[in-house]
Image: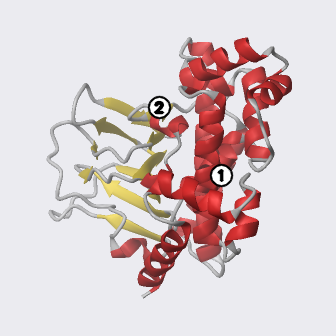
């Protein structure tokens, strides 16, 4: 798998949720800060203002995509003068239990100009947050316009159709479309940064073919006996320049990142599979389950078995 696909597979937890909402002016809606999640807004019809806690309002037009990678609170409104009601569209909102659409009518009976928005949230596991995502800005705004990849618009149209008119199978289609949408948004944002002169850190790493080759090697086979020299060979660089370049862009030396990724992968496998510890240890590069258990406890503070049991109990509680 490539790095972005791997990162998204590891950090997501629970089911992503979404809504198809029609607001009529005058309207305003506050979205509460939800740490451990990422929220999005996509304007389908009309326009509105994004009112961040700090800074100037941002006008959003039809086709604009807004992603809050860190679950930051914000308000959408038809104008800066409309006071918002209590926060809504939170992850525990019971309306998120199934795909839904609703027409939000002002209590006074106003039927002013309408704005239609897709809003939703992705639940993330803060214990496995990748540094790639930690470095994202508080908000990612992709304005509508010619030149945007057609697959993003196609994903939005399919999601809007499923949420606007739930049918047989929508419960399976919506989560898949939401995950696809998140992938497309991040793919576009990462690809656009070098052209804007913003390619630093992980943005630069993912746009550096040589460092990406080493990262793909780690992610493709975390259990292989990688060394700095063998990873440098994958990158087509000599050992010392590769190690300096890798650390400068990712913030970690190559083998430190390798160990971190192995433990992150192990944590996901412990909670998503029932594989015995010995083959699981081998899968992430440890010759014995005892060496693996010691390394895992250093990383997570508990032995692998206890970590697995805690995750199973949590999943059972969610089902209840």
Residue of label 2: 135
Whether 284 is drawn above or below 209: the answer is below
Residue of label 1: 155
Whether 243 is drawn above or below 301: the answer is above
User: How many dots with numbers?
Assistant: 2
Residue at horizontal 59 percent and vertical 76 percent from the top: 171
Q: Label 2 crowding class (10 Å Cα cut-off): few <14, some 14-19, many 20+? A: few
Residue at horizontal 73 percent and vertical 44 percent from the top: 219
Q: Nearer the viewer, mark 2 or mark 1?
A: 2
Q: Is residue 215 visible?
A: yes
Residue at horizontal 61 percent and vertical 78 percent from the top: 167
Residue 193 on image: x %, y %:
58, 21
Residue 64 on image: x %, y %:
50, 37
Q: Label 1 crowding class (10 Å Cα cut-off): few <14, some 14-19, many 20+? A: some
198 lies left or right of 94? right
Instruction: Give the structural element (helix, strand or loop) at label 1.
Output: helix
Q: Tell which circle, 2 or 1, labels the residue nearer the N-terminal end.
A: 2
11 lies left or right of 91? right
187 lies left or right of 304? right
Task: Tell me the quarter of the picture where residue 246 sits.
Answer: top right
Residue 184: numbered disc: none
Q: Going by the picture, which residue comes out furthest to the bottom?
A: 320
Whether 145 is drawn above or below 308: the answer is above
Instruction: Give the structural element (helix, strand or loop) at label 2.
Output: loop
Q: Is residue 146 visible?
A: no
Residue 17 on image: x %, y %:
47, 64
Distance of mark 2 from mark 1, alpha carbons?
25 Å
Whether 235 is drawn above or below 173: the answer is above
């Amino acid at each position: 798998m490539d790095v972005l696909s791997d990162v998204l597979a590891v950090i997501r937890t629970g089911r992503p949720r979404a809504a198809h909402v029609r607001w009529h002016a005058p309207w305003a809606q506050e979205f509460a800060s939800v740490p451990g999640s990422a929220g999005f807004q996509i304007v389908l019809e009309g326009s509105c203002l994004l009112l961040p806690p700090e800074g100037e309002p941002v006008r959003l037009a039809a086709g604009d995509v807004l992603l809050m990678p860190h679950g930051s609170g914000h308000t959408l409104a038809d104008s800066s003068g409309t006071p918002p009601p209590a926060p809504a569209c939170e992850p525990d909102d019971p309306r998120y239990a199934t795909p839904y659409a609703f027409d939000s009518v002002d209590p006074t009976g106003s039927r002013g100009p309408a704005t239609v928005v897709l809003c939703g949230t992705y639940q993330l596991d803060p214990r496995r947050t990748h540094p790639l995502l930690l470095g994202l800005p508080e908000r990612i705004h992709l304005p509508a316009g010619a030149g945007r990849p057609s697959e993003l618009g196609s994903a939005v149209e399919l999601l809007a159709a499923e949420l606007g008119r739930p049918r047989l199978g929508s419960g399976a289609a919506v989560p898949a479309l939401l995950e696809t949408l998140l992938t497309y948004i991040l793919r576009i944002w990462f690809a656009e940064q070098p052209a804007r002169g913003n390619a630093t850190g992980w943005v630069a790493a993912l746009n550096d073919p040589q460092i990406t080759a080493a990262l793909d090697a780690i992610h493709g086979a975390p259990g292989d006996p990688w060394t700095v020299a063998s990873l440098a060979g994958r990158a087509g660089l000599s050992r010392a320049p590769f190690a300096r370049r890798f650390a400068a862009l990712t913030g970690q030396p190559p083998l430190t990142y390798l160990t971190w990724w192995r433990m992150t992968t192990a944590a996901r496998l412990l909670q998503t599979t029932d594989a015995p510890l010995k083959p699981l240890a081998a899968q992430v590069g440890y010759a014995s389950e005892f060496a693996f258990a010691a390394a895992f406890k250093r990383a997570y503070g508990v032995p692998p078995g206890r970590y697995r049991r805690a995750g199973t109990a949590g999943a059972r509680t969610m089902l209840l």
